[in-house]
Amino acid sequence: MNLDGVGTNHCLRKPHLNVQIPRRPHVHLDSSAFVTDPDLVRTLQKESISIAGDRDRVLFYQGEEPTGLYILHRGSATLSIRCRERRIDIKVQTTAPSLVGLPSLMDGAPHAFTAVAHGGAELSFVDRNNFACMIESDTLLSLQALGALVAEMAFTSRAILDQIQVEAENAA
């Protein structure tokens, strides 16, 4: 099945993540914390539907309620975080295979970032209700998802703290 309208309303194994900080050179961070168990991706994929990836596609915007989980099988996506209080803008380039939107889906809070899949990406989508049923019925899957979530949260915290440190050093 192909789902070509999913996106605007509604970890991960990568060699490197590219964090872009405005007016600063690219910073490459080790993404070893983002290694996703391939079994997790395979299991989630069984309940997913394909999404056309022929063009750039906004998967969701920062502040939107989660409607499901995106699986990036091939290609890349950009995750953008804008924190107005601290005037921080962080962009993270992620590559496949990645789970996009997991933190919001797990805690039910609005998305903390905007996600855009780039043209040529191979994506699939697991609806929130299907994801919840899978997690509730499979203890191993629940633990695998929690492991991916912890790794993603650790990386995000590190990226934000690095940016705050850079700003503090520039202000001094």
Image: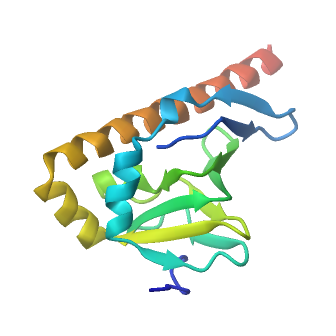
Quarter of the rendering containing residue 26: top right
Quadrant containing the N terminus is: bottom left
Seen from the viewer's position, the closer of residues 59 and 84 is 59
Quarter of the rendering containing residue 110: bottom left
Residue 45 on image: x %, y %: 39, 64
Residue 83 on image: x %, y %: 60, 46
- The total number of labels drawn is 0
Q: Is residue 10 above or below residue 82?
A: below
Residue 100 on image: x %, y %: 50, 56
Q: Is residue 24 above or below residue 129?
A: above
Q: Residue at x 50, y 36 (%)?
A: 34
Seen from the viewer's position, the closer of residues 51 and 132 is 51
Q: Is residue 106 above or below residue 156?
A: below
With 11 as the anchor, is 131 left or right in this view? Answer: left
* Residue 161 in sight here: yes
With 31 as the anchor, is 110 left or right in this view? Answer: left
* Residue 67 in sight here: no
Quarter of the rendering containing residue 28: top right
Q: Residue at x 59, y 31 (%)?
A: 31
Quadrant containing the C terminus is: top right
In the current view of this chain or complex, which residue is farthest to the left? 137
Q: Is residue 172 above or below residue 90?
A: above
Q: How is the image coloured?
A: rainbow
Q: Residue at x 80, y 20 (%)?
A: 171
Residue 89 on image: x %, y %: 70, 44
Q: Residue at x 59, y 25 (%)?
A: 161
